[in-house]
Amino acid sequence: MRCENILVTGVAGFIGYHLSKKLLEEGFNVIGLDNLNSYYEVSLKKERLKQLVMCSQNRVNKLEFLEIDINNKEDLNKIFMKFQPKIVINLAAQAGVRYSLENPKSYIDSNIIGFHNILSCCKEFNIKNLIYASSSSVYGGNTRIPFSEKDQVNHPVSLYAATKKANELFAHTYSHLYGISCTGIRFFTVYGPWGRPDMAPMIFTKAILSKKPIRIFNHGNMFRDFTFIDDAVDALLRLIEKPATPNLEFKKDCPDPSSSWCSYRIFNIGNNKSISIMDFIGALEKELGISAIKKFEPMQKGDVERTFANTEDLEKYIGYKPNTSLEIGLKKFIKWYRNFYNLF
């Protein structure tokens, strides 16, 4: 029995919930932090927490949930002092590309100040493994596909993407200066049961079932690398067991952006497929047995036309290979959606 303390921020979020559930099943004590903000319905976040509490019942290892904001350094210090975690997974962030146009300050507070507070605590309390969420959004205006971690990502097209790129830079600096093992994860459109209501799978499903129009941007000429949640969690679990290490072949005169001379790594977590949004909608229609009412609109500011993850580096590092097809993933997602919202 492990009973090792592992700190997960954003524990009531979509990925945070699934990862924490798996960690509890694997025998870890989960110290879960979340500010339960109202970016989307708090009731869903509380229901995820309820599921985690149930999962931790009758176990030697436990879930300890604390409602705090990571931009409160004093509260964070107290938690690190009390629980002395050696592994930290930072999934807390202000999410959403489009919302960053409306409320940029929330991204600075959470994604910049909050993440710096996490790094500072990792330094002060000798954390041996920090894994943090970056995003496929950092690829911004890049057109070479599939997106590789070895590509330069210097042209973000949204504030959200810029804050995630800044996280990677901060992490490298702290790894170099203080020896913290830092692994940044560029997630590609993660979906599945208990998903985020602000993302396409939930938005489209709700609209189709309600017989309301779905907004399709760039007149349908959009492609996404849809990644099932179980595949993303599998990769994270493997990275917990294998902290970032220095690249012994790193060349400063020809630097690899995904690694360093210090214990710093960047990895894509995706399905290694770029699927047309129209094909995605078609798969949803087939699974639901209902045709969507489509409303085509121009591209929105801050959005990108295509995402497509090259996952070769992650496969070499931890043996990760995504194995959930869109058809299987959507079937599991729709089954959960109907059950959760009592739609039969």
Image (tube, rainbow, N blue to C red):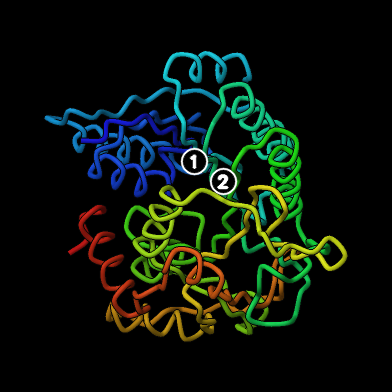
Q: Are marks 1 and 2 in contact (CB under 8 Å)?
A: yes
Please tell me whether mark 2 sits on a helix, a strand or a loop: strand
Q: Nearer the viewer, residue 3 or 248?
A: 248
- Which residue lies at the image location 36% right of the left edge and 37% below the top edge? 43
Residue at coordinates 57% horizontally, 65% vertically from top-left?
268
The residue labelled by disc 2 is 132
Disc 2 marks a residue whose amino acid type is: Tyr
Would you call the spot at circle 1 few (<14 residues within 10 Å), some (14-19), or many (20 or more)? many
Classify 223 as above or below 171.
below
Where residue 305 appears, x then y in whole percent? Answer: 68, 77
Depth check: 137 or 245 in front?
A: 245
Per the model, the C-alpha gap separating discs 1 and 2 is 6 Å
At 37% across and 82% down in the image, what residue appears?
A: 283
> Dot 1 corresponds to which residue?
89
Disc 2 packing (10 Å; few <14; some 14–19; many ≥20): many
- Quarter assignment of residue 28: top left
